[in-house]
Amino acid sequence: KMPINKGEIRGMVGRHGRGDSKNWLAAVSHFPNGVPRFESRAACLEFMKEYNTKTKAGSNPDFQHLMHIFTMLVNWEQIENYLLPEIVRARSEPSNDAADDADVSENNVYEADESKQVLKDIEFRLNQPFHKCTNPQSTTNTLKYLFHHMKCGIFVMIRNGDLRIFAPFVNSDYRNNWGDIIKLEADNTIDSYYTKKSGLYREENIEHDRFKWWANGNIICNELSKSNTDTQFWGDHFLAPLRDMLAEACRLRKIPDCEFFLNKRDYPQLKVNVDRGVPVEPYGFIWNKDDRDPEQDVDLQAEHKFAT
């Protein structure tokens, strides 16, 4: 465990806007796209240990114990302080927004006959009514939906041909709307369930409040870090490859200005009832419904419904 005396911004804005910390920019300057790449797990650990020992800096400016590879915003106050002002700033910057449609159609593998169905499925999804009007307000609505209802997400902005913002976020105070629905075997008590489980599996540090549990598809998660002071709130798996992929796409292609959210989880975070043209609960199976049957779709609560 490294001694930490401060926090910093890493990998969120690069050299743009407020900018990532000077220490981080210097450390990753020799990597392609300014994103660490490693041939092995050992090489990655060596780089991060050396960096953390040298800088004694955590990955979050307000929560020094956080040690993600990139800054992860962990409450709504941080989103208001760091992300939203950066989005406004980036939107006001000059941009030579220009896509090359010829380049896309000639070199995009999804334009090939054998994979064109993927493109058709994406176009079908984007043509749904709630995707028709995308604007600054729809970005804010999606951010609120992911943060408050789904717990986490990654905001991405590409501007003037560059990856302008890459901002993972997680709601450290998340509360679900299905804690009273989940039932356990036997007498439905957590103590009985884990007493029976204890002889078969490793020891776990469990969150007992079912409204603090979170879901990743069919997996219900309730295991905490061994120490509350060490909790990272959300893992940083795949963040470096995702950021590198986006930066590489910007380098090799002429990508127009755009804003979107990435889902690095195992299951879709946004589901639509096609006949009604409205979003519904993405995890209908938690309510013991068949997700394949639109007639069984579960409506979203009012506070998570938005027009766009």
Image (cartoon, rainbow, N blue to C red):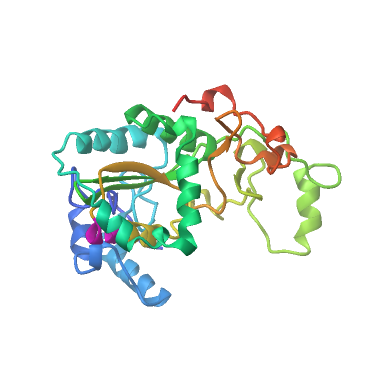
**Residue 61, quarter of picture:** top left
Q: Is residue 183 above or below residue 117?
A: above
Q: Residue furthest front?
A: 113
Task: Residue at 56% x, 22% y: name it.
Answer: 302
Task: Residue at 21% x, 50% y: name it.
Answer: 161
Chief SS of the magenta region: helix
**Which quarter of the rendering shows the N terminus?**
bottom left
Q: Is there any visible trace of residue 280 in the rendered image?
A: yes
The image shows residue 308 at horizontal and vertical percentages of 44, 28
Q: Nearer the viewer, residue 51 or 131?
A: 131
Q: Is residue 271 left or right of residue 2?
A: right
Q: Is residue 249 on the magenta stretch?
A: yes
Q: Which residues are magenta?
A: 247-253
The image shows residue 107 at horizontal and vertical percentages of 31, 63
How many numbered marks have been drawn onto this rendered protein structure? 0
Task: Residue at 13% x, 39% y: name it.
Answer: 94
**Residue 295, quarter of picture:** top right
The image shows residue 46 at horizontal and vertical percentages of 34, 73
